[in-house]
Amino acid sequence: MFESIRKHSKIVMILLFLLIIPSFVLVGIDSNYFSEKSPVVARVDGDKINQTDWDNAHRMETDRMRAQSPSVDPKLLDSPQARYATLERLVRDRVLAAAAKEMHLVTSDSRLARSLQEIPAIAGLKRADGTLDAEAYRALVGTQGLTPEGFEANVRRDLSINQVIGGVMGTAFSTNAQVKLALDPLYEQREIQVVRFKSADFSAKVAPTDADLESYYKANPAKFLQMEQAAVEYVVLDLDSVRSGITLNEDDLRTYYKENVARMAGKEERRASHILINASKDASSADREKAKARAAELLAQVRKAPATFADVAKKASDDKGSATAGGDLNFFGRGAMVKPFEDAAFALKKGEISDLVETDFGYHIIQLTDIKAPRQPSFEELRPTMEAELKQQQAQRKFAEVAESFTNSVYEQADSLKPVADKLKLKVQTASGLTRTPAPGAVGPLANPKFLEALFSSDSVQNKRNTEAVEIGPSQLAAGRVVQYTPTKTLPLDEVRARVRELYVGQKASELARKEGEAKLAAWKAAPATASGLGAAPIQISREQVQNLPRPLIDAALHAPTADALPAWVGVDLGSEGYAVVKVNRVVPRPAPEGQRAQQERQQYMQWWASAEGQAYYEMLKKRFKAEIKAPRPSATLQAAAEN
């Protein structure tokens, strides 16, 4: 039958076409037929931000951060909190873009050019004649996945957006009186005495009965929950596993040696002498022209008599550090000098004298005096390094192919990880006691929230099927399956009786400590002379000097009202630690700051005030443009999961 279909495939295709097309005509095609519908996670000014927008923005953000900090832990970049922060930034950008559009804020070409020149990486691409190396610029922005036009459009947009908030923050101001009024209480000190009523001192007075413990256990079931747990097995595909399966060809190694021996031998070093005529980049055009003319005279002189270069450098060079040595700079490699100087020095032959070389320091005349070429290592000396490099390169090229095989295998043979492990020579690893959130100290896939989410999906838990392949880092995939699952349950009283007793005694002891402390506070307020146990010597505390006291106690002491009369009394509930009574003897005003300290404090306050005004303005813009985030905050999501 199948042979007949194969022979008459064209006829079959025509029949299928005639059967399928009428169904589309009669029923119609859903708008989502050719594109997957992505849920809306936020709205700004009537425009939707969907899950795909969010995912793309977060991927770009993590790629940028990985490029800047290759050693950063990938799990930190892909945490729920990091993802939500990306969404908030995405909403903020949309709000400010809408405001910039409404205000007709645009960035001129000249402003864009100035901003690009202020980026150090781009400024370093300038040639000696002041022009930009276009190819290097294209390569630089290409590392961000952008063309020069796309990169400049992003910069132009960012500059326009920054004008929205910058216009508000740039107008923030404050008087010295305002600074004093705000900062004096912040740095104020108070002299206090403290009496502590520790819960531990009252524990002996608590004698719980079995009925008390059972009642506490029933009233607080959430404290004795054992969260759902799973025992799992999993496999990881990464560059190391791909690399371990690569066998190198000897001919490939020898070809690699020929192509890379110069690079692997080390950097060439050059020795040069120079004559510098100072002309800073901030100097006037007239001064720079004068310096250039002087340098040109010296250039003509040393070219006429090259042997006098050292004598001329001693007498005329403005680089006093090298002038005494005849301008000698000793040996240096690439990257040691500013780029125009380096380019000129490495373009010379031994004994040659350069043309005038302009840098931010002025005008240089360079004479190349020696070249130190690195020793060329033998093939066998470089074999270990070449094998490692070549295997790494081949693993990177092969990873996509192996990753596709990995992804297909864990899906097609979903009842076991052994087939994919055998096929790709991977190790099946196991773990027990896993929960939906990473355990402290967890590493690898067990520290990845996306992988744990896949493991605890309904299909994985109920059917014990393999998860899909989950990306847990750059060139890292993992798949797992649940071997044993234990749902959330309340542990029986007999199993947690010791814990119940500990919590019950602690609660009742804290209540006794608070009751005793409140009674003493009332008595001492009424008759201060009867206060006892306040300590031999008062101590001075402030927000900066907490004297090893609990933060709630410090806050209570600094907030205690002192305007009416001193001493002031205040009680502080320290929770499980008990209770404290604080006597405030006096307020110690801080000395008026002077000089640089006062200036720093004023600048700091101005930054705080400008940030507060900028944030307030942004909140107003959010309301104006009806900004709304529909995705829940991670903490709320985790709390809901815990409650369920």
Image: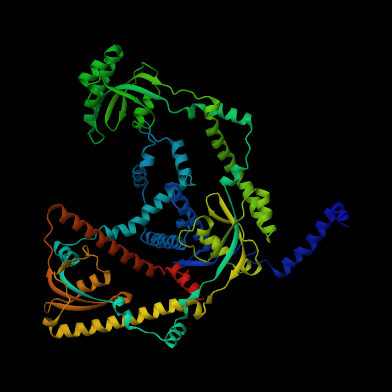
In the rendered image, residue 280, in percent from the top left (x then y), is placed at 24, 33
**Left or right of residue 546: residue 438:** right
In this view, the residue in front, 334 or 472, is 472
Q: In this view, does 473 lie above or below 552?
A: above
The structure residue drawn at horizontal position 64% and vertical position 61%, both measured from the top left corner, is 466
In the rendered image, residue 167, in percent from the top left (x then y), is placed at 29, 58
Q: In this view, does 615 lie above or below 497?
A: above
In this view, the residue in front, 453 or 537, is 537
Count the labels in the image.
0
The image's colouring method is rainbow
Q: In this view, does 587 lie above or below 365?
A: below
The structure residue drawn at horizontal position 88% and vertical position 55%, both measured from the top left corner, is 4
In this view, the residue in front, 458 or 428, is 428
The structure residue drawn at horizontal position 36% and vertical position 66%, both measured from the top left corner, is 621
In this view, the residue in front, 444 or 590, is 444
Residue 136 appears in the picture as rendered: yes
In the rendered image, residue 266, in percent from the top left (x then y), is placed at 45, 28
- Quadrant of res 359: top left
**Left or right of residue 488: residue 345:** left
In the rendered image, residue 327, in percent from the top left (x then y), is placed at 27, 21
Residue 106 appears in the picture as rendered: no
In which quadrant will I find the N terminus? bottom right
- Quadrant of res 561: bottom left
